[in-house]
Each structure stands twice: as C-alpha cells, then as structure tokens.
Image: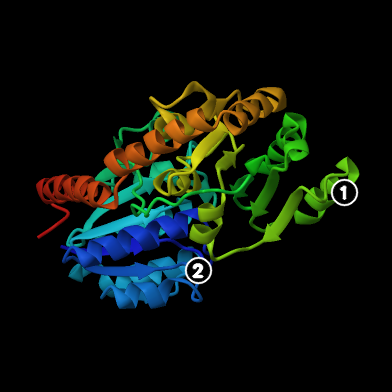
Amino acid sequence: MKIMHLVCSDRFAGVEQFVLRLAVAQAAGGHVVHVAGGAATRMPEQLRAAGATWEPAEGVRAGVAALRRRRHRLDVINSHMTDADAAAALVRGRRGAALVSTRHFALRRGRVIGIPVDLLLRRTVDAEIAISSAVAAATGLPSTVVHSGVPHAEAAAHPGKIVLMAQRLQPEKRTEVGIRAFVASGLAHDGWRLDIAGDGTQRDALQRLVDDLGVGSSVRLLGFRADLPALLDGASLFLAPCDVEGLGLAVLEAMAAGVAPVAAASAGHLDVLAGLDERSGFRPGDIEDAADALRTLATDGARRSRLAAEARERARAEFSLAGQVARTEKVYERAIELATERGWRA
C-alpha cells in the first residue's frame, strides 16, 4: 500500500511523534510510506532508516503543494490535525488517493481561511480514525477507534524513589496540579523526588511555584529530555495530571516500561487505565485525590508492583504497534473501497 501522512507543522510534539512511530512501523511492514511535515531535526533520520521518505510541510499551503505532487501515486492520504485536513480536502481529486483523517483531540475541527474544516471534509473524507473513545465521542462524526501503539520495552527494576512527569509545560497539561499533589502527598519527607521532563511556555512560572513552595530540593524541572527510557528506568511512579489528553502516549510508554501510572481519570486516560487498580486514576484537577493516589502507591510497594505489572501487560496486549498498524490498515482498506465506489478513484 502507498501511504502518505500529512501533518502541516514543523514541530515534534505528540501528534508528530504519533505520525513518526506509525509511519516507521508501516514501512517496516512492507508499505511504501511518505511523510510530509514535522520537525526537520527529528523526523527524516528515523524515517529514512525504516525505508520511508520525508519532506517539510509547514502550513496549509505547503501541505497542498506536497499533496499535489504525489496524490495520483498514492493509495491513501492520512491527514493529522486541522491544517492537514484542510489541505487534503482542498486537493482531493477524482483520480486521487483515498482520504483518511486521524482525530487526535477531543474537539471539533476549527476553521481555515474562515471556512469550517468539517464542512470542507463532509463530502471528501472516506474514513476517520479516533485515537480514543473520548475523541470519538467529542468530534460528533462517525469514526473508528484505533488506539495508539507503543514499543514493548524491557522491564526495569525501577528502584528509585522517583515520581516522573514527562509532558510539555503548557497550561492544558496542568503541571502545577502534579507539583501541588506531590507536595501534598508528603512523600518528600520519605526521600521521594518529583522529576519533570519537558519544556514550554510555563517553565519559568512553574519554577517560581517550586521556589515559592520551598520544595526545590525535591522537585526538579529537567527541561527537554531525549532520554525518556532512561528516566523511566529510574522511576517508580509516573504522574500525568492533564485532564484533556486525546489518549496519553507518555502514560502508555511508562506502562510499557513497567512503571506504575497515576493519571487524571478523564478523556483518553480512561481508555488507557481501564481495568487497572483504582488508585491509578484520580479525579481531574483534585490535588488531594492525586496526593492520596501517590501516597497509597508509594507506601505500598506490593500494590505498586502489582499495578506496574498489570499496566505493562495491558500496554503489551491492547496498545501494541503491531495492533495499531493492523487496525489502521483495515480502515485504509475500507476507505479505498468507499473511494472507489464513490468514483473518487480510477
């Protein structure tokens, strides 16, 4: 199958990581894969190593140009986020590829050049994929839930008294909730530490919060880190306070590495945490409930170990890359059939 992923950005955030991971896995499975968009410093090397190709595509105009160069040589265009969806809708031609849109956020699409993108796609999209049940419910349009997959990492001993957070330091990520919950848990008095990996617009404000709370010796802002597997190896708990995640790839990566998760029980996290220990989740935004979850698991090593093992098995069984590729391929096949029936394809 000849596949093109389009993400009209020059970044490397959660969606771009999703695209990279899926594209590499698809190429490894024998598909011909091209990616347009994402950070030039992060995307090309791994894609080329897997036999896929890449080009920059920042913005709708660049996305349109990339699609026009390739659409007649493709089986499937898989667009990601509103700008890419708009570019795909604008370019769609009767002899082009099937169009599949992957929905990453529990929101309706916005507007591009003043036009609602949902309106643009109403007659052109052949299938939609939602990365979680929460996203599928929020978009208001028919979609197939295909959970993101993560590599199945080797389990580590996780000996350290470390709670790890790994996320962009943006307001919607609720990093301050995680910091305040750790402080309220009292775990610092027992030798535990909170490490926060990530960067963003809130970093200075969060550092001021740490200083104001007087917890600089037990709460560390590490900045951007490319060595998440190493950080997970040293952590015993993974804290995810964001209450609007489409799914929560960082939580899944922690689970796959055998780190016990504690996450806001809302949005995509509900799919990820289903069936696990009740203390793997806390009421969104509730600092005391999050603190209680951290304290319960930190002070009960046996319970924490059981949760870590169950979480790792759940990640392996329900969120594998192989499973994601297979389920995505089925959506692509149905989209190609529908596009052919509609006369979009020759």
Q: Residues within 10 Å of mark 1 (few under 14, many from 20)?
A: few
Q: Up-down: is 273 above or below 25? A: above
How many numbered marks does the figure carry?
2
Q: Up-down: is 21 above or below 178? A: below
Q: Is residue 92 left or right of residue 37?
A: left
Asked whether the viewer can see residue 134, the reply is: no
Q: Is residue 27 left or right of residue 166?
A: left
Q: Judge by depth and name the residue closer to the eye, 265 or 32.
A: 265
Instruction: Give the amino acid type for the residue marked by disc 2 in the picture.
Output: Glu
Q: Residue at x 46, y 24 (%)?
A: 277
Q: Is residue 193 left or right of residue 77?
A: right
Can you give x and y, in whole percent of width and height, for residue 220 in the image? 74, 53
Q: Residue at x 48, y 43 (%)?
A: 259
Q: Which mark is residue 58?
A: 2
Q: Residue at x 15, y 45 (%)?
A: 334
Instruction: Give the amino acid type for the residue marked by disc 1 in the picture.
Output: Asp
Can you give x and y, in whole percent of width and height, for residue 241 in the image? 62, 37
Image quadrant in which the N terminus is located: bottom left
Q: Judge by depth and name the residue closer to the eye, 7 or 214.
A: 214
Quarter of image, res 190: top right
Q: Residues within 10 Å of mark 2 (few under 14, many from 20)?
A: many
- Secondary-structure class at tag 2: loop
Can you give x and y, in whole percent of width and height, for residue 165 in the image? 61, 47
Q: Is residue 72 left or right of residue 66?
A: left
- Secondary-structure class at tag 1: helix
Q: Up-down: is 80 above or below 184? A: below
Asked whether the viewer can see residue 227, the reply is: yes
Quarter of image, res 276: top left
Image quadrant in which the C terminus is located: bottom left
Can you give x and y, in whole percent of width and height, for residue 27 in the image? 23, 67
User: Which badge, 1 or 2, is on the more N-terminal residue?
Assistant: 2
The residue wearing badge 1 is: 211
